[in-house]
Image (tube, rainbow, N blue to C red):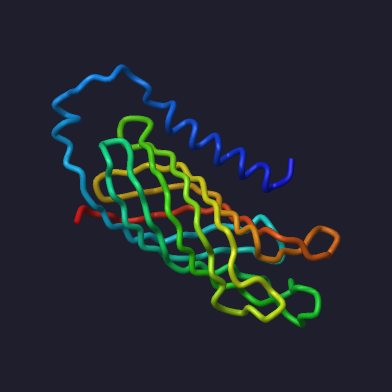
Amino acid sequence: MKIAGKIKFALALTISMMFASNVEAQETTNEATNYDQGFRLGFGANAGYSVHDPYKLALGADVRGQYDLSKRYSLTLTTGYTNLFVSKADAFPGQTEGKDLGIIPAKAGFKAFVWNDQFYLMGEAGAAFAVSNVDNTREKTSLLLSPSIGYATKYIDVSLNYTHYSHFDRLNNNGSLGKGVGQVGVRLAYGFKL
């Protein structure tokens, strides 16, 4: 199965688990009717590893706005900066040395708490804008898809995610150029109610 197929499958699985995790008879409880909907803001640091050459390490920071629809479901908007590092030995054809890729993501998402109101699944989609070390022959904007699983408390949020940039160049095993760069990462964030 190709990477794009795996990503679509993971995204579909994440979304279906969000909606299937809490199918219950419709009962009104005091907890549900008294839940205080509202906004949260979080600041996160990201570290990861690219699963495609020539990129290796990925580091970044982000800001996430979250609107709680209920105790279990939230909508998110996230932006920040991510840098995909290239080792000095790796480079695209025609380059004498590898150049890192700086990216600004803009993504919207849906978060669903599935266990103890602390463990969650989240799916995000949006655009990634390349802002550093991009020449005229390379794509400057890419579709971005990112499923994640995480644990959140009142202030701390830790998650494991996979992010796929479908239009950025990568090196295939045979040295030819291909499309689509993926990274596996960990996000550690501090958040609070507004």
Please say if 56 is above or below 3.
below
Image quadrant in which you'd find residue 172: bottom right
The quarter of the rendered structure image containing the N terminus is top right
Q: Of all residues shown, which one is farthest toward the front? A: 26
Image quadrant in which you'd find residue 27: top left
Please say if 110 is above or below 91.
above
Please say if 57 is above or below 101.
above
Of residue 98 and residue 133, the one placed in the foreground of this image is 133
Q: Position of residue 142 (x, y in %)?
A: 59, 63
Left or right of 68? Residue 150 is: right
Residue pictured at 65% horizontal, 62% vertical? 167
Of residue 90 and residue 165, the one placed in the foreground of this image is 165
Residue pictured at 70% horizontal, 66% vertical? 169
Left or right of 143? Residue 26 is: left
Residue pictured at 30% horizontal, 34% vertical? 117
Q: Position of residue 63 (x, y in %)?
A: 36, 62
Q: Of all residues shown, which one is farthest toward the right? A: 174
Q: Of all residues shown, which one is farthest toward the top? A: 25
Residue pictured at 61% horizontal, 38% vertical? 9
